[in-house]
Image: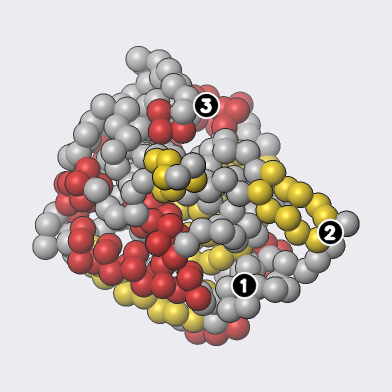
Amino acid sequence: MKNVIKLSFYSAIIGFSLVTISCENNTDLNDDLGVESAIPVESLPFKYRNAELTEAENKKLTDAGYQLDEVTKLIRTNEDGSKETLYNTSDYSFSPASLEQSLADPSRGYRNANTVFGNRTYTIALVDFGGKYRAAAQSAINDFNNVLRTTVRLRPVFTSFSNLRNVNRDITAYIFDFRGTSFRGNGQGEIPTNNRPGRVIGLNYIRNFESSAKEIGALFKHELLHNFGVEHSDWATRRSCGSIVPVPDDVPRPIAVGGNTSGDFIDALMASCNPFDVFNGVFRIRFTEYQTDDIITMRGIYGFK
Ligand SMILES: [Zn+2]
């Protein structure tokens, strides 16, 4: 018996291709995947569980301009056993410390985000990235280094899940099955905390089932910038997702360091939903490369090199 999963477009960030995926009931996801395999969430070295937002958290999130019905709270247990709270919205998460930093000093980062130390090379581990995922990651990291050309660079380490514990890294990228989590986009980034990049990038195996290497590369480029503190270029309106979300005037606004500062700009890889054009009746992702606004933004934060 076929179980047809129809995925909504809501909050799908880059490349929400018109996916209608058929899969057998009770089939192990790792069957039929070839070299591209998804890591079950329960197998991740990072464990997630949902938690309730407190009244105090609700107030801070509201003060920072978040819509409470779009924020979920997660508790993550890290590999070393430490626990972290994360707030998840759209296709990225952020920490309470990051929220405090945004509230205390909106000029600290660009568009409501926090940043990392510049003049450094950060190591990103890519866990079990095969096939189109490997090509996508290589392309994304190459463009991060050679198109953005800022003082922050990435050093990729392709590794297996079993060898991960031996890899010192700043960011860990996984392909995993988001079902059963509150992650809803094609990918998942993480805003920096205390000047270190977001720890995790997740790529949603299910939603990228039909995506090409080029489209996954675009998704990866988008999530990478979240991990270095860049928000969505249409953060105020989310117009690229087809909805206009009014934001109260009294919400503190970050001081932008470059790029289009309107909060309603969609011609960027960092648009909330990468816009689509229609070719021959088929929706295609619009941007697969960093756009001028993305480049100006990153150079504005970290400097050109
Ligand atoms: Zn995003």
**Mark 3 or mark 1, which is nearer the start of the sequence?**
1
Mark 3, residue position? 67
User: Quick check: is the Cβ at mark 3 less than 8 Å away from ligand 1?
Assistant: no
- What whole-number distance in Å separates the C-alpha atoms at marks 3 and 2? 35 Å
Secondary structure, mark 2, is loop
* Of labels 2 and 1, the one closer to you: 2
- What numbered label is drawn on residue 188? none
* Residue 128 on image: x %, y %: 54, 76
Q: How many marks?
A: 3
* Residue 219 on image: x %, y %: 43, 55
The residue under the point 73% across, 48% down is 5
- What numbered label is drawn on residue 25? 2
Residue at the top extreme?
Answer: 249
- What whole-number distance in Å separates the C-alpha atoms at marks 1 and 3? 34 Å
Label 1: few (<14), some or many (≥20) within 10 Å? many
| Along the line of sight, the residue nearer the viewer: 29 or 149 | 29
Residue 271 appearing in the image:
yes
For residue 149, what is the image quadrant? bottom left
Q: Is residue 153 left or right of residue 241?
A: left
